[in-house]
Image (cartoon, grey):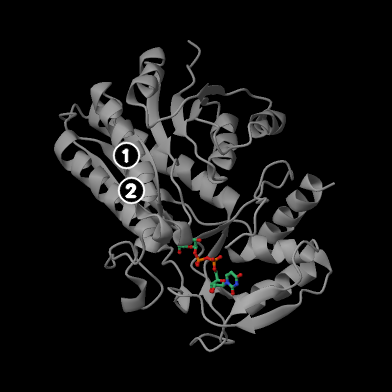
Amino acid sequence: MEEQSRSILITWWLGYIWSHTSTVFLEEDYNIIIVDNLSNSDISVLDKIKEITWKKLKFYDLDIRNLEEFEKVFKNHPEIEGIIHFAAKKAVGESCQDPFLYYENNVIWTHNLLKLMQKYNKKNIVFSSSATVYDSPKLLPPFSENDRVGTYNPYGTTKLIMEYMLKDLATFKWFNVVNLRYFNPIWAHHSGLIGEDPKWVPSNLIPYILKVANWEIEHVQIFWDDYDTVDGTGVRDYIHVMDVAEAHLSAFNQILKYREYLLENKIDSNRWYFDIFNIWTGDGKSVKEIIELVEKVTEKEIPYKIVSRRPGDIDTSIANAQKAKQVLGREYSRSMYQAIEDAWRFIQKNNS
Ligand code: UFG
């Protein structure tokens, strides 16, 4: 008998990770159902995904804050086996200016989703968390999954609240949950078809430098050079987005494996899976090292100026990469050079 494809629901909002993750699941023959209200998104990305994978996904243009509308998706798709939950707002600065926007969007979206998952008995979820939940000023890098958490801005607070909600539901409602704590992804598929090219001035380092390379911005501002790091500039654990995307597949497989194990061994199915993984390389690069790498890839000089510290920045954020390797069998596989090369290819294609 022909094996049926599995189906997953992906919640999308603005970000870039969902599209890359979709390509990974489509290539594994999953059926994908996407929800987004398109208020801030570029619909052409759906065609790009089709161009990469030669596969279609099912798209619902709806607002997941509206529970009634959102419920239709669960009604129409009883075949959904799991949810990959990306939908969230993610700008630290914006969250400090308007915390309620973040509470409303991130927490209420997630609350609605979880309510429907409970109602329709769809309890497998991979959640996009962030390294921002680590109490980094009080920790020594690399950060491990059982290190202490603490937040310093409303964005981080919403991520932590959502992690806690999921933990509660795992414990008391038998949800199967994997929280992935992303470090610093660099967004672009090697095809150059999907990636990050913000239309506004980016707040993150890599897209900012690439705009300088593309002559859209005059110079990079390095947020001070007196940190306790290799050259005084901030160090981060940058990771190719496709490594992040593939980690979602491993995480989801981990949940499925656990459910199959219960079934095969006739163990009471009212048991839950809960785990957290850093998504990560375990290695760090400074701002100046990244600038040098971009110069190599683009063959352009990147001018920079040292300016004052950005409030809230820490000197070093690096993941301990061991747990994902041991439990999920997953390590990153793409170099930083490749990540920047792919991001640059996307920018050039997107601007030609
Ligand atoms: N930086 C500059 N100039 C810039 C932008 C950044 O010097 O124009 C420096 C920062 O000081 C930092 C490094 O580059 O040392 C990286 O900064 P990013 O803004 O790219 O990334 P952050 O590590 O500050 O934050 C990112 C995400 C957050 C997430 C966090 C998790 O933006 O949403 O990683 O670790 F929470």
Q: Is residue 28 visible?
A: yes
Asked whether the viewer can see residue 139, the reply is: no
Q: Is residue 244 above or below residue 340?
A: above
Residue drawn 66% across the image and 72% down it: 290
Residue 250: % across, % down: 45, 43
Locate residue 161, reporting x and y percent.
27, 51
At which x and y percent is residue 205?
A: 61, 66
Q: Looking at numbered disc 1 in the image, what kind of residue is underneath it?
A: Ile
x and y percentages locating residue 224 in the rendered image: 56, 83
**Mark before the other along the chain sequence, 2 or 1:** 2
Tell me what residue is drawn at x 50 percent, y 86 percent.
227
Image height check: is 91 above or below 298? Answer: above
Residues under numbered marks 2 and 1 in contact, where contact means CB atoms less than 8 Å apart = yes
Amino acid type at circle 2 is: Tyr
Which quadrant of the structure image shows residue 185? Answer: bottom right
The residue positioned 66% from the left and 64% from the top of the image is 208
According to the picture, the residue beneath numbered tag 2 turns out to be 103
Q: Secondary structure at mark 1?
A: helix
Name the residue carrying label 1: 108
